[in-house]
Amino acid sequence: MKPRLAALTAAALSGVLVATGVVRTTPASAVPVRANVLADESGEPSPEPSDSVAPSDIGTPSSSAPEPEPEPSSVSPAPSVPGDVTPPTGTFRLSATALWLGQTVRFDQRAADVSPDTATRVIHWGDGTTTALSAGTATVTRQYGRTGSFPVTVVLTDRAGNRSTIAAKTVRVSTPAGKWALSRTKVYQGVPFAVNVSSMPSGTTRILIDWSNGKVVQYAARKGAFTGDILYRPGTDTRISGVQTLRISFGNANGFSTYQTAGRITVLADRTKPTLTITKPSSPTRIASWRTVRGTVTDKGSGAPYVRLTVARSTSAGKLYCLTPARKWKRFANDAQFWSYCAEKGVRVTASQGRWSLKVPAGTTKGQFLVYAWAWDRSDNLTQKSRQVTLTRK
């Protein structure tokens, strides 16, 4: 969750009102929201992710010991039919015979696939477990809990007690091979870093990354950097710190593989606010002195890469204007308009080597002139500054 500046007791922003030709500002009742600022302003390239929801087909190997296969004598056929000594016959299909650990194989056997007098069917999965199919059941699924080669067979028993085994189809389960590494092993809260994938298993169509902060993002398969950051615990204002484990999974037509460790990163706590200034010109009452607004921003921790500004002015006739995010003057008449037109987002300026500047468009006249600046660092610490002057000379 991002803190709302509206809750902070900051310098005056909204409601630039004119009383007897002088601008006054009400206490900060509305200050720009933090939401979706960090995500799109980190300056780090990142691929467009799809919905950040982990698909339900990610496998989790079972930790329980496999059940032993039953002896043939454990299958109880229907009463024997005198004179019938012909064993039953049948076939079955598997959705895949090569899986990654965590993926699921589907077994399919329709009524037409076995002898009409078949009474019982038991699948032997090749890993020590079995599944007895009830009458009318056509499809079942199986997820293997370990890698290896598993011969799948089906034991058929007819009503006369004759038994046969459908020949094995082997399912081979492996761990998907790939190469990846974290771009950094230590970062401040909120600082972007990347999982760099240099190779991936053949046939991969999707990549899933668990960023360890409650965010799981699915990406189209490709080599290269996948960028994210770690700041808050899901749905809270609690910031994450300490050693975090990232996980990666690969997907194809059979679903997603079991997660593998993508790397471990140390997230450092940052509680230091940025240092922000608005430079006072040598002749602050001159209009020309404010054609460019300048200042500085520095941060000892995660860094403050940009500053946002709200600039407002009045004329001697009492008309009020503010600077929109598009850097255009917009006339306003009340707090709601001021907030909507200019103050909610402000004008974003990027800092370079700790310095920032904003060219103010033409139009400033004699009257009141207000500059309000605020800066977040990447760890969501906030600093605010303001300057208000009366312009009396060109």
Image (cartoon, rainbow, N blue to C red):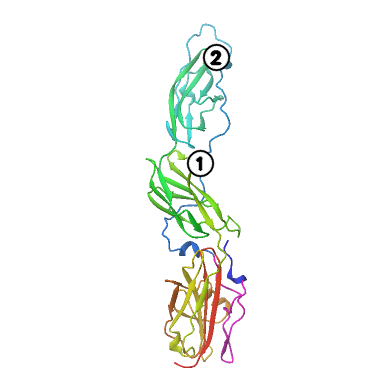
Residue type at mark 1? Ile
In front: mark 2 or mark 1? Answer: 1
Q: Specify the principal SS of the magenta part.
A: loop
Q: Along the line of sight, which residue is nearer the eye, 295 or 95?
A: 295
**Left or right of residue 78, residue 298 in this image:** left
Residue 278 pos. (x, y %)? 50, 79
Q: Tell me what residue is drawn at x 56 percent, y 54 percent.
A: 242
Mark positioned earlier in the residue sequence (2 or 1): 1
The residue to which callout 2 is attached is 159
Could you say whether the residue bearing mark 2 is in a helix, strand or loop? loop
Say if the magenta span includes residue 393: no
Say if the magenta span includes residue 30: yes
The residue to which callout 1 is attached is 58
Residue 79 pos. (x, y %)? 58, 12
Could you say whether the residue bearing mark 1 is in a helix, strand or loop? loop
The crowd level at tag 1 (other Cα within 10 Å; few <14, some 14-19, many 20+) is many
